[in-house]
Image (tube, rainbow, N blue to C red):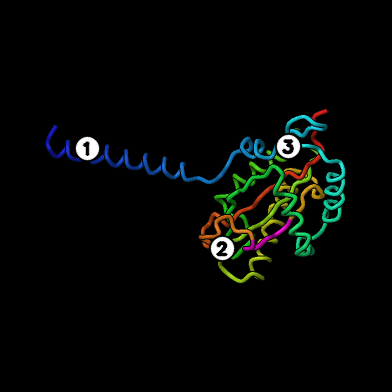
Amino acid sequence: MTHFDRFFGLKAITLTAALSLTAGLAFAGDNNVSSSQILDALKPKPITRGLSVGPQADPTAQAKEATFLNTVRNRQTRSLSMGERDQIAELASTKPNIDLEIQFDYNSADIAKTSVPSVQALGKALSDPSLKGSTFVVAGHTDAIGTEEYNQGLSERRADTIKKYLVQNYGLNGSDLVTVGYGKTKLKDAANGADPINRRVQVVNMDTKTASK
């Protein structure tokens, strides 16, 4: 083998290794999650009755939650008042939830192609028998760029897009999906308002029926 052949052979090996490394980094940077990850995050936490250790089931509180959820079920996202949005957020803060970095086309409510796998994984997870009968909140969030009014409307349209996708493609009951938009009012990283991490869809399992007897 000549020096010329050895040189270009070495270059080819180096290039192949570099391409393999680049592919690995691209995969590692993928923000899509699996249906099993979503399912694990949304499974209801065991609830106890009586004086045993652990979260206690409060029938009165559960009844109030159920009554409130029924008032927002089947409502148009834009019809929710600020007070209702805040009440949903308060209830959701204690429930099983997951933040999905679902990206949308620029200035649009269309799901970006790169995020379709995450939405499909969400559909599979919410279709799982273990979550049957649960009511889910689908909350849209934006980053801090733009006006409050614009971002509020955009977050609502994006939440509606996810709901429509789940109903049309996975046969989920629309009345079991409560959509709400928070615009830029609940940033995940308030110190970096423009960070893409703030552009997300939060899914919350509002189920309060699961309890150990």
| Dot placed on the residue nearer the N-terminal end, 3 or 1 | 1
Q: Which region is colored magenta? A: 180-185
Residue, disc 2: 106
> Which image quadrant: the C terminus?
top right
Amino acid type, callout 3: Pro
Residue 210 location (% of width, % of height): 79, 35
Question: In 3D space, how far apart are the residues under numbered discs 1 and 2 (Cα atoms)?
Answer: 43 Å
Residue depth check, mark 3 versus mark 1: number of the one nearer the observer: 3
Residue 67, above or below 49: below
Instruction: Tell me the number on the disc at residue 10.
Output: 1
Answer with the quarter of the image where residue 171 lies: top right
Identify the residue at image location x=77%, y=29%.
Answer: 52
Using the image as rendered, state which of residue 91 and residue 3 is in the foreground.
Answer: 91
Question: In 3D space, how far apart are the residues under numbered discs 3 and 2 (Cα atoms)?
Answer: 35 Å
178 relative to 100 in the view: left or right: right
SS type, badge 1: helix
SS type, badge 3: loop
User: Residue placed farthest to the left in the image?
Assistant: 3
